């Protein structure tokens, strides 16, 4: 009987180790100063067991959330960046330029306060694929937040060789999300 328990224990530990994000495997553009990362699956599992002690923010643009959907368990959408106005093409990014949300920090603090949390409680940030959430995590860390995590695979995940975002991410992991948005969770100010 002891050997069966030991085999089960080792199997569970192996699964946990496979799920954990290896800091050394995080691409440079997704790295944060704090070095705290979660996969979308890990974020969801922790939210399921400790939701009242975590602020989970989707930091994508309002347009992304409106068109692509949003995790149903996210506390709010607080965009880290907006599309620049007027819209300007960026040859470097091969996309339209974006500009930082000057009210990001105050909006995060407001959402934190609404949930009865402090800057020492856990904050999970998710963008499309992990780059903006890393930058947003750095901003919060610089502002004194002590427990900020970037969801490294984001909502849509990383690109496969065919250019499609199908490798990982919230949606591709079968985690709960919806196109239907809750007005109370949306960022309604500029």
Image (cartoon, grey):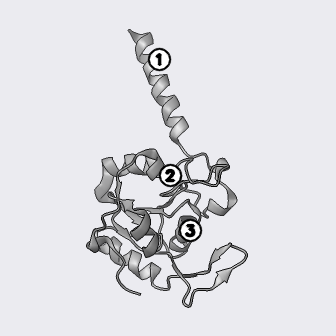
Q: Is residue 153 above or below residue 185?
A: above
Coordinates of residue 133 in the picture (x, y in percent) = 53, 65
Q: Is residue 124 above or below residue 141?
A: above
Residue 124 appears left or right of 161: left
- What is the distance, in whole Å, between disc 3 and disc 2 at their CAs? 14 Å
Residue 123 appears left or right of 84: left
Give the number of marks: 3
The answer to whether the residues at label 1 and label 3 have Cβ atoms under 8 Å apart is no
* Residue at image location 35% in from the left, 62% down from the top: 179
* Residue at image location 62% in from the left, 86% down from the top: 88
Residue 190 appears left or right of 30: left
- What is the distance, in whole Å, between disc 1 and disc 2 at their CAs? 30 Å
Going from N to C along the chain, the mark reached first, 3 or 2, is: 3
* Residue at image location 45% in from the left, 79% down from the top: 105
Q: Quadrant of residue 35?
A: bottom right
Tell me if I can see residue 120 in this picture. Answer: no
- What is the distance, in whole Å, between disc 1 and disc 3 at their CAs? 40 Å
Going from N to C along the chain, the mark reached first, 1 or 3, is: 1
Q: Is residue 12 above or below residue 50?
A: above
Residue linked to disc 1: 7
* Residue at image location 41% in from the left, 82% down from the top: 106
Q: Which mark is residue 169?
A: 2
Going from N to C along the chain, the mark reached first, 1 or 2, is: 1
Tell me if I can see residue 190 in this picture. Answer: yes
- Seen from the viewer's position, the closer of residues 179 and 25 is 179
Q: Nearer the observer, disc 1 or disc 3? A: 3
Residue linked to disc 3: 132
Q: Quadrant of residue 165?
A: bottom right
Furthest-top residue in this view? 1
């Amino acid at each position: 009987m002891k050997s069966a328990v030991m085999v089960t224990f080792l199997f569970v530990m192996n699964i946990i180790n496979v799920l954990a994000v290896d800091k050394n495997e995080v691409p440079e553009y997704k790295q944060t100063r704090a070095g705290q990362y979660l996969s979308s699956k890990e974020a969801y599992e922790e939210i399921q067991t400790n939701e009242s002690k975590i602020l989970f923010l989707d930091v994508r643009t309002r347009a992304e959330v409106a068109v692509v959907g949003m995790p149903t368990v996210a506390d709010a959408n607080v965009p880290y960046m907006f599309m620049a106005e007027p819209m300007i093409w960026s040859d470097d990014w091969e996309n339209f330029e974006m500009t930082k949300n000057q009210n990001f920090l105050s909006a995060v603090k407001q959402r934190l306060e609404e949930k009865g949390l402090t800057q020492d409680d856990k904050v999970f940030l998710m963008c499309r694929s992990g780059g903006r959430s890393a930058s947003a995590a750095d901003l919060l860390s610089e502002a004194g937040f002590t427990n900020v995590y970037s969801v490294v695979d984001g909502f849509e995940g990383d690109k496969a060789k065919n250019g499609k975002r199908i490798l990982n991410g919230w949606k591709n992991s079968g985690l709960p999300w919806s196109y239907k948005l809750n007005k109370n969770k949306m960022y309604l100010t500029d």
